[in-house]
Image: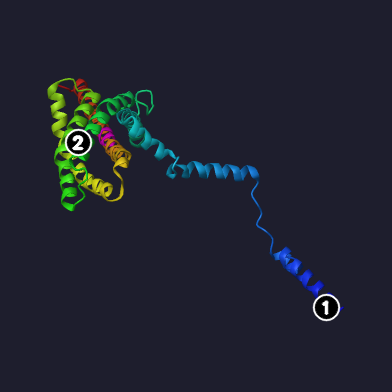
Amino acid sequence: MSQVKFEERETVRTTQQRDGGGRGTAFAKEPPQQPPQKRDFAHTVGDAITKGAGPNGYLAWYLKKLQEDPLRTKMLTSGSLAALQEFLASWIAKDRNKHGHYFTSRVPKMAIYGAFISAPLGHVMISILQKLFAGRTSLKAKIMQILVSNLVIAPIQNVVYLTSMAVIAGARTFHQVRATVRAGFMPVMKVSWITSPLVLAFAQAFLPHETWVPFFNFVGFVIGTYINAHTKKKRLQALRRKYQDSRSVGDERSEYDRRASGPGGY
């Protein structure tokens, strides 16, 4: 009889422990679950943010497009980034058109430049660079690759860039374009010589070749936006100083004319 009671007590105790029974139930409550709508929205946002790193994510899709149709993909990417770069630089520098908008006529022009000039040129240059050093992973080969990129490829791309920017800005003669290129070549080259070795060394060490294009596009977009915004700010400051100087000179002339035409004037 005592044996039966002991087994019943053990059964009840085991059931209470499994169910969290007894006084511990008040302290073992499960955390409140989020409402289904909020949880679903959070999961959706999380999936959208982290999807890019997955095998079916945005980066994998973009790399697939680069392999299937590299030139067309680069043209669409470069054109979109160039237009966005111009718009962001205008917004950062507060450079509006006569209607007060940041979407100026330079935005579609920059899109044309990015799609039909910058992308094909970059496609050819990067392809040549990768073919010259394909399969060469020694330190000497990496250093040579950086030197060729900075001393051959970068000058060509910067000259084309400055020429295009001069034409977009309104230059119509050879002398105007030449003056723009000569004035901006060394400043742009200095930026290239500082950033390009670091970017290329990072790509050599950590990135596979198929990801070089989107990585270079991203870095170029950030640097280009900064340079473009800085240039716009300097131009706007120069225009403001010129306007203020012209007003001060005009006020002085008006005061002189007023005094000269008054009684006792010459």
Which label's residue is closer to the chain start, 2 or 1?
1
Q: Within 10 Å of the Cα at label 2, are there few (<14), some (14-19), or many (20+) other Cα atoms?
A: few
Tell me the distance, in whole angstroms, between the alpha carbons under discs 2 and 1. Answer: 89 Å
Question: Which residue is rendered at x = 24% and y = 49% of the image?
Answer: 201
Q: Position of residue 184 (x, y in %)?
A: 17, 35
The answer to whether residue 215 is seen in the rendering is no
Q: Is the residue 163 above or below the residue 230 in the image?
A: above
Three-letter residue code for mark 1: Gln
Name the residue tied to disc 1.
Answer: 3
Element carrying mark 2: helix
Q: Position of residue 73 (x, y in %)?
A: 34, 30
Q: Nearer the viewer, mark 2 or mark 1?
A: 1
Q: Position of residue 24 (x, y in %)?
A: 72, 68
Magenta part of the chain: 231-236
> Which of the 4 quarters of the picture holds residue 167?
top left
* Residue 234 lies in the magenta-colored region: yes
> Which of the 4 quarters of the picture holds residue 239?
top left
Between 66 and 231, the residue placed more toward the observer is 66
Q: Position of residue 79 (x, y in %)?
A: 32, 29
On residue 30, the disc is: none
Question: Which residue is rendered at x = 40% and y = 39% of the image?
Answer: 60
Q: Is the residue 163 above or below the residue 211 in the image?
A: above
- Quadrant in the picture for the C terminus: top left
Element carrying mark 1: helix
Name the residue tied to disc 2.
Answer: 128
Q: Within 10 Å of the Cα at label 1, are there few (<14), some (14-19), or many (20+) other Cα atoms?
A: few
Three-letter residue code for mark 2: Ile
Question: Which residue is rendered at x = 24% and y = 33% of the image?
Answer: 122
Q: Main secondary structure of the magenta part?
A: helix
